[in-house]
Image (tube, rainbow, N blue to C red):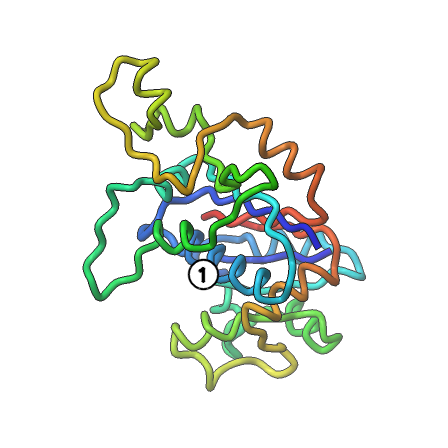
Amino acid sequence: MLHTVNKSSFERNSLQSCLNAIDDSSVILLIEDGVISAANNANSSMLAELATQGRVFALQGDIDARGISSKVADNIKLVDYAGFVDLVVEHGTAVSWV
Amino acid sequence: MKISIQINEGPYQHQASDTAYQFAKAAIAKGHEIFRVFFYHDGVDNASRFTVPPQDDRNVVNNWASLDIKNADGEPELVVCVAAALRRGMLDEGEADKNGIDGNNIHPAFRISGLGQLIEAGIQSDRLVVFGD
């Protein structure tokens, strides 16, 4: 499954809820304010662990719009909207943690 | 692949509609079919033909209309939830007549219908992607 998270973890706990719920084959795409969690000082060890497994993506346009391009944590893969579409196609059911 | 989209937030207040539009445009560019876009809750405000943003700003309503998402019968597949729309003063000609109101504001690229259209989109499509706040 694909899980999209669109809120900063400083605003809501939707990322943590998502991390607690997902199974071993799921991937996470951070969009909108959710990309704040992709910054290397956002301090989520669970997210960092998933990122080392190549299972965390973030939307490039939203990263750029928030001025955090130079702070993206290691192993988080950046995608454009075409990449977003590919993730939806490849990973089956899409769940939005809004 | 057949993809449907659900949008729960209005234009300009939240990013949901912008993200959904960019997603839909990218999906079409990749050769996928957008089966239906369902506007629910405050998302119904994306269908107002009275929207007039500043000239140097994007026009969210016209952006959606420009995708020209229609079914085989030529009906728009930008579908606005009727209950959510009527509550918020979003009316097409038929609903205005029915309720004795002297005006209508649904953009012609959209149509008003019921929640069953969302369920059908979920059944008929390979994917349903939700954008909200």
Query: Along the horizontal axis of the image, is A90 left or right of B48?
Result: right
Given residues A57 and A45, the one toward you in this image is: A57
Residue at left offset 69%, top offset 44%: B125
Q: Please identify the residue farthest to the right as the structure is shown.
A: A24
Q: Quadrant of the N terminus of chain B?
A: bottom right
Q: Residue furthest front?
A: B73
Q: Which residue is mark 1?
A: A10
- Above or below for B40 versus A13: above
Q: Is residue B83 left or right of residue A91?
A: left
Residue A67 rendering spot, x and y as whole percentages = 39, 78
Q: Which quadrant would residue A45 be assigned to in this image?
A: bottom right
Q: Position of residue B57 (x, y in %)?
A: 25, 63
The quarter of the picture where residue B119 lies is top right
Q: What residue type is disc 1 on?
A: Phe
Q: Give x and y (percent) for residue A83.
A: 62, 70
- Name the residue located 53 percent from the left edge and 57 percent from the top edge: B24
Number of marks in picture: 1
Indicate the position of residue B22 as horizontal and vertical percent values. Answer: 48, 62
Camera-side residue: A92 or B34?
B34
- Looking at the picture, tell me which residue is in the foreground, B81 or B31: B31
Residue placed at 41% from the left, 44% from the top?
B9
Q: Chain of mark 1?
A: A
Q: Is residue A58 above or below residue B119?
A: below
Is residue B26 left or right of B120 when viewed as pictured? left
